[in-house]
Each structure stands twice: as C-alpha cells, then as structure tokens.
Amino acid sequence: MGADPVAGVTPEGSRITVAIVDDHPVVIEGIRSWLATESRLAVVATGEDPDAVLGAGQPAADVILLDLRLHGRMVIDKVAELSGAGRRVVVYSEHTDSDTILAVLDAGAVAFLAKHEGREHCVQTVLAAASDRPYVPPALAGAIVGDRRSGRPVLSDKEREALLLWFQSMSKASVARRMNISEHTVKQYVDRARIKYARAGRPAATKAALLARAIEDGLVRADEIGN
Amino acid sequence: MSTELAGHPAGAFATTVERGPRIAAVVIAFGWHVVINLPAMLAQWPDYRRPWVVGAGWLIFTVVGLIAAANLLYGTPAPAWPLIGVLLLVDVAVFASTPASALFDSANFGWATLGWFVVLLLWGRRIPALVAVLAVGAAIALVAVLFVRGGDPADLSRYAMYVYGTATLPVAMMIAVNLLGALAGSTARAAAARTAIETERAAAGRVHRARRDRLAALDRTAGAILVELAEGRADPADPVVQRRCALEASRLRRLIAESDDVPDPLLHELRACVDVVERNGVPVDFVAVGTLPALPVEIRRQLAEPLTTTLAAATRWARLTVVGQPEEVVVSLTTAGTSAMAPEPASGVGDTIGRPGGDPSGGRIEYVYEENEELVWVQTRWRA
C-alpha cells in the first residue's frame, strides 16, 4: 500500500517505518495524516488483514499500529503473537476499559492508545515505541492506576500519584506543579510505573526490549528489575 | 435497597398463608358453640340448677369468641389472659349449674368448648401456654366430677377420656398452625430473596433500556451531523461543526465505556451532571476506573459537589475522572483555563489549594482546587 508521500525529506533509512492495520480505510487515512506531521515517521504498509500487511514481501515496519477490533473480533491473540516475535505493536482502540487495556499490555504491546487521544499522543507513542521506550497516554495511565488485580506490579507512592494526576489532568506541567517536582521527574515516575508492567504477565520479546532500554537509559536499575 | 423492598412482600406473604387457618379455627369454635352447644343447652334448660347462669355463660363465651375472632381476622386488640380468665370462670359456673346426670354431656358446654376458644385467644403463642390453660380446665372438671359424682372408677375413666378428647384436637391444631407459620416464614424469606434478585434485574433492565434510548438519540444527533458533513452542508473547518462533532464523539465514547449493570450512585450522580452540561453543548470526557466502594451519602455528596459547580460553569470542554479503590476514591475535574471560575474557594489567579477538612463519620475528604492559564483543576479525594 504505497510508501509515504513525503519520503525524501529525510533519507528512508533513518526514518521510522510504520504499518497501520485497521478495517476502516478512513481511520487509516486519518492516522496517516497524523503521522505525516512528523518527518521522522514513514508509513510503509497499511491494510485490514494483519497477516497480509505484515507478511513476507511487505516492507518491514519498525512499529505496527494495530486496531484492536478487526471485523468485529478482538485480536489480543494477534498482539501476543506479534509481540512474541519481537514486533513493536502499538494497539489503538475505542475499547478503553481497564481490563482490555491491561490485557493488551500483558500480551506484550509496547503501548495502548485510545482512539480519541489524538495526534500528539499518537505521534509520541509511535516515536517512543520505535526506540523501545515507554509512552503512557492518559487512558493507559488510568488503566494502570485502576488496576486491582491480585498479581499487579507494586508501584511506589510517587509513581502512583504521578500516574493518577497525569491521568486526571493530561498535563505534565500541572502534575509537576502539583507534586512540586520537574516535568522531567513526572515523566520518569510515569515511565517507571509503565516499565514495572513489562515484568508482569507472560514474557515477550518486546517486554525484554523495553526493560533493557529502561536500564540503559538509567530509568530503572537492573537490581530493581530483579530476575 | 433490596432488603427494604423485600420486607413488605415477606410480611404480606406470611399473612396470606396464615389467614386460611385463622378462618378455619373461628369456624370450628363457633360451629361447635352454635350447632352443638346451643341445642344441648336448650334441651337441658329446665334441668339446670340455675339456667340463667348457663345462658349468660353461653352468651359470654360468644362475646369472648367474637373479640378473639376480630383480633385474629382484623387485628383489633384482645387481652388474651383476662379473657381466658373469664372463660375459666364461666366454665366453673356452668359446672356448678349442671346437674350430675349431664356432667359428661354437651349441655356442660364450658368443658368441651374451652379449648377451641383458648386456641383463638392464644393464636401464634407457644403450645405450653395452651396446654397450661387446658390443664386448669381439666383440674376444674376433676374437682367437679369428684364433688358431684364421687370417686367412682367408671366416672374417672370417662373423665380421662373426656380430657383426652377435649385437649388433643385444639393442641393438634395449634401445632399445625405454628408449623405452617414457620413454613410460611421461610417461604416468605425465599420469596423476598427472589424479589430482591428481580429488583436488581429490573434495575439492570432499566439501565439497559436507558442506554438503548441514549444510543437511539445519539443515532439521530450524530447521524445528523454525519449526513450534513457527507452532503457538504456542514463545513469541517467551521468551529461550530467541530464542536458538534466533539460533543457527539464524547457521548458515544461514554456510552461505550459504561459497563456497570446496576449503576454506582456516585457515578450516577456525576453522569447526571455531565448530561446537563453536555446539553449546553460542552463536550465532557468522563472516565471511571477501578471499583468504587459503597460510600455513605454524605461522603458521596462531599466528593461530587465541589466538582459539579465547576463543571456547570465549564464552557469549552471538561474532563471528569473517577478512580476507585477499596480504601480511596479520587474524583477529578479539569476544564479549560479560561472557563468561568467556581467562586469557592479560589481567590484571584494563580494556584490555589483549599482543604475543607476531614469528615468524622466515614474517613477524610481532601479538596484541591487549582487554576492557571492552562486549566482549572478540582480534585476531591476520600481516604478510608
């Protein structure tokens, strides 16, 4: 399904390639136009069937934006399959209930994006995902804050408060003011909380990559991660 | 809610089940008193030692029986023990007026009928009370038999059979009635439990219908803007059109997100407020995560009220979130910074934080208000 029309502004090799899987062409076009505002991103494949879009013969995409509901079916199993194979999947959906979001994280998705969260969050999520870094849009923050499952990761008070306030206000500046810390620190708390979820659920190559990058970035220490 | 609703059917059911035996008991007592005692008394009339005492006794039995029946069927007051005392006195008087030849006859009606009338008066009480009264009746009869006819073994044996005959049927009836009452009670409790479940199901049904109605309404309003866009009558660049789209989208999102079958009261209150604000054309993002504990009305009010004032004043957009945990509930509202301000407790521009203090009854409510160029942020937090 065609290369990005703005290819050429930056050499293809240094750009982040993205595949979009959705059963509504209008949504694909909408996301394509969002991503087009960021010159580092190039949409290389789109379609409604993940196997066709990501199959042999298609350009390899660094990040896959996957609609969770394809032709009336929730494709969490597909998320697990792709994540297990090391593909960076960003799930986006209008199904924003906590159970669904947490199931998507467990399956190994790099991030979850609510469809209504808009261009800025979408671009930021894809950029972060490409480098195996966490990005926590508000809907995902809400799901983590509301997580009451028995085996859930243990968050520190600061991490939980930062997530909660970020979920509520969607403004890191406001969270920073409220907590009397810098915006950078707010992001660190939120990201650390997200990284703790990379340890939960079944192992996936994408989770290992998130953890490895978090240690490399100094976001968490190896001894904090445990086994 | 369910127990309150369930209380009435349980009581009503038990009363209905009990009414049949009550009527039966009244019919037996009066049937005996009128069909058997009355002709026997009239036939014996000339031979009574004091006929008018026996006649008055029959009338007193009738009156006491009517009082007991009215109490049983209509709940009018009836002092059971004094009336039983009256019956026993009549019993003694009738014995004293009956000739020796008619002692074991229906003409001596007090002895045979006492049990049935006492059953009416002692309805619903324990069996030993009835047995005690019947024992007193049997003692009176024994004294009379010994006094009038002497200690003849044949008379004593007739006496024993008569006591047995007059006591067993009323006692059996009382036992049956008490068992039936207990059965009715447990059946009523089962019925009440069923009612509670059905009430819950009805509430879920109402929620479902309300949701369906809202979806139908959304179908019309969202459909209208989509048609206008498709036909080119609405311009996507027009801020008014964008606003309408945002509003319909937020309504749709909320409908999809709602998953509660029986709505939590706090969410219900907040949702009602959101509906009002949306009707004014302000899109509201309303997200609830976690599970809310049951909160007292006062706590719910303190959680919701500070936000609803600000929410009602929102002019461009609003985001309302609820995070519930067993030991903490946090409600937050953010709106555009330029929207109309809630007067309390802010003063001037800049960050303002207010805390109205704790609540002694059910945990602490913390209140935070913050306002800057970017947003107005109100947060209430309850901690157990």
Image (cartoon, rainbow, N blue to C red):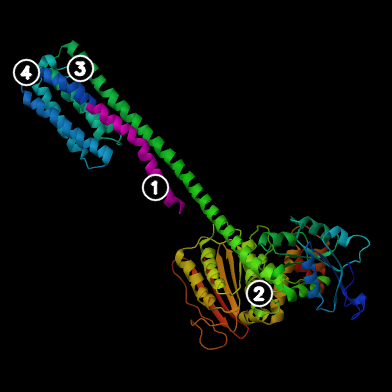
Residue corresponding to mark 4 = B46
The local crowd at label 4, few if under 14, some if 14 to 19, many if 20 or more residues have their Cα within 10 Å, is: few
Q: Residue at (47%, 73%) from the top-left corner? A: B358
Label disc, if present, on residue B159 of the rendered structure: 3
Label disc, if present, on residue A166 of the rendered structure: 2
The local crowd at label 3, few if under 14, some if 14 to 19, many if 20 or more residues have their Cα within 10 Å, is: some
Secondary structure of the residue carrying tag 4 is helix
The local crowd at label 1, few if under 14, some if 14 to 19, many if 20 or more residues have their Cα within 10 Å, is: few
Instruction: Give residue B198's position: percent from left, percent from top.
Output: 50, 47
Mark 2 vs mark 1, foreground winner is 1
**Alpha carbons under labels 4 and 3: distance apart:** 25 Å
Same chain for the residues at labels 4 and 3, yes or no?
yes
Kindly indicate the quadrant of the structure image that contains residue B127.
top left
Residue type at numbered disc 2: Trp
Q: Residue at (72%, 59%) from the top-left corner? A: A103
**Alpha carbons under labels 2 and 4: distance apart:** 104 Å
Q: Disc 4 vs disc 3: Cβ atoms closer than 8 Å? A: no
Q: Disc 2 vs disc 4: Cβ atoms closer than 8 Å? A: no
Q: Earlier in the sequence, mark 4 or mark 3?
A: 4
Residue type at numbered disc 3: Tyr
Q: Chain of mark 4?
A: B
